[in-house]
Image (cartoon, rainbow, N blue to C red):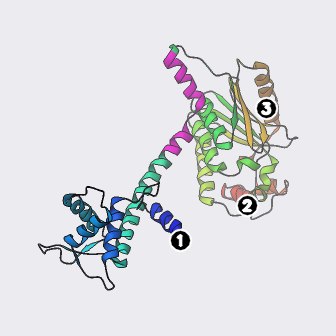
Amino acid sequence: MTNDKEISKALELCGFVTGDRQESRLIHLLSVILKLQTDPPIPLSFSDIYDQMMKEETESKLTRAWIHRVLKSLVDAKLVRLESPISRRKRYIADVNTVMAGLEQIKSDRIHELNLQKGEIDKTLLNIAELDCGELAQQFVKSITGTEQKISSRIVRGVDELHRVLRYNMLDVAKKGDIVRLTALWLGPFVEGAMERTMRFIETAKRGVDVRYMISTEVFRIEDLVASASYDIAKVLALLQNLGELRRAGLKFDIRIYEGPKTYNQVSLNRDNMALIIAENPVTATWITRDFNSDLIDNAVKTFDREWKKARSFLDMTPKDLEAFGVKPGGLISNIASRNGKK
């Protein structure tokens, strides 16, 4: 640090001075003691310090008791040390070593305090991010009017917000016998976190919901879509294990490969509501209910069901089948098929 401004900024950063850079009582008295000291330092009596303080504060009405309290605070903060703590007559020493010790203590306390604040801020950020504004709006209106009003449409931005809307409006409310339809015809924005999001659909299927997951052949070049060719095989195996358990239990979850032209990504619950992804970068979707546009939902479901009947299940494909789609042996997709027991 080369100037007073930098020093003040650093002291403020570690919590030693106030935000307006006004010297605190501690700094004022500490400066008086430092100016009195010699090098090497000579222990100072209380009278030495008090007399010098009176010389510098001629118009103030500082009491001996006040200076005693501030001196004790300086000692507690390790900025000043006592020559002999057990002696009845206290003598005080302050130099670069005591200042360093005190600043280290203040810095440590400040870091602890900021970490506590950071923890609270992180917790608050998480709570805010988890809020679904649609659900909150309905609860707010009901608390005021006493009547329940349903949202018929909304714009959703970002992958996380999209899946939050899907969870509140589809995955969490779907019941046994319901059908969740999903098309993923362009995957780029959805590669990151795909395993975790797929697991949420699997959990929904475990409740007896018929989950139909239709994905484009773009999945066969998944290695090209991610930043690196590395992947967490443990997560892949956990997903496959869940799919195997669903099949053995007679529950419905299927991933089928769509080979037609790309149109749009959509997710629907029965014919009740649907999320239609309308932009890829950034991900933007419109979520609508049947009350808002029943024809759009009916047409989307009709198109999906037609393509679903023609599509092939990825879970039944062998490595040989995958090679026909240009999948290279030893890659992610090939390994998934191999570990799924397909020959």
For badge 3, the amino acid type reads Phe
**Which residue is drawn at the image coordinates 63% and 34% (left, top)?**
165
Q: Can you say whether 252 is above or below 113 in the image? A: above
Callouts 2 and 1 close, C-beta under 8 Å: no
Q: Main secondary structure of the magenta part?
A: helix
**x, y percent for residue 290:** 71, 20
For badge 1, the amino acid type reads Asn
Callouts 3 and 2 close, C-beta under 8 Å: no
What is the spatial separation of the Cα atoms under label 1 and label 3, in whole angstroms? 70 Å
Q: Can you say whether 56 is above or below 179 in the image? A: below
Q: Which residue is mark 2?
A: 227
What is the spatial separation of the Cα atoms under label 2 and label 1, in whole angstroms? 46 Å
Res 325 seen here: yes
Counting other residues with Cα less than 10 Å from the Cα at mark 3, is it few (<14), some (14-19), or many (20 or more)? some
For badge 2, the amino acid type reads Ala
**Which residue is drawn at the image coordinates 76% and 20% (left, top)?**
293
Q: Quadrant of residue 105?
A: bottom left
**x, y percent for residue 212:** 70, 36
Write the start and end of the magenta stretch as one range.
124-144
Marker count (numbered): 3
Q: Can you say whether 315 is above or below 56 in the image? A: above
- Of residue 342 and residue 54, the one placed in the foreground of this image is 54
Number of the front mark, 3 or 2: 2
Quadrant in which the C terminus is drawn: bottom right
- Of residue 326 and residue 160, the one placed in the foreground of this image is 160
Indicate left or right for 72 with 322 as reference.
Answer: left
**Which residue is drawn at the image coordinates 78% and 63% (left, top)?**
329
The tag on residue 304 is: 3
Classify mark 1: helix, strand or loop: loop
- Does residue 127 show up magenta in the picture? yes
Res 176 seen here: no
Earlier-in-chain disc, 1 versus 3: 1
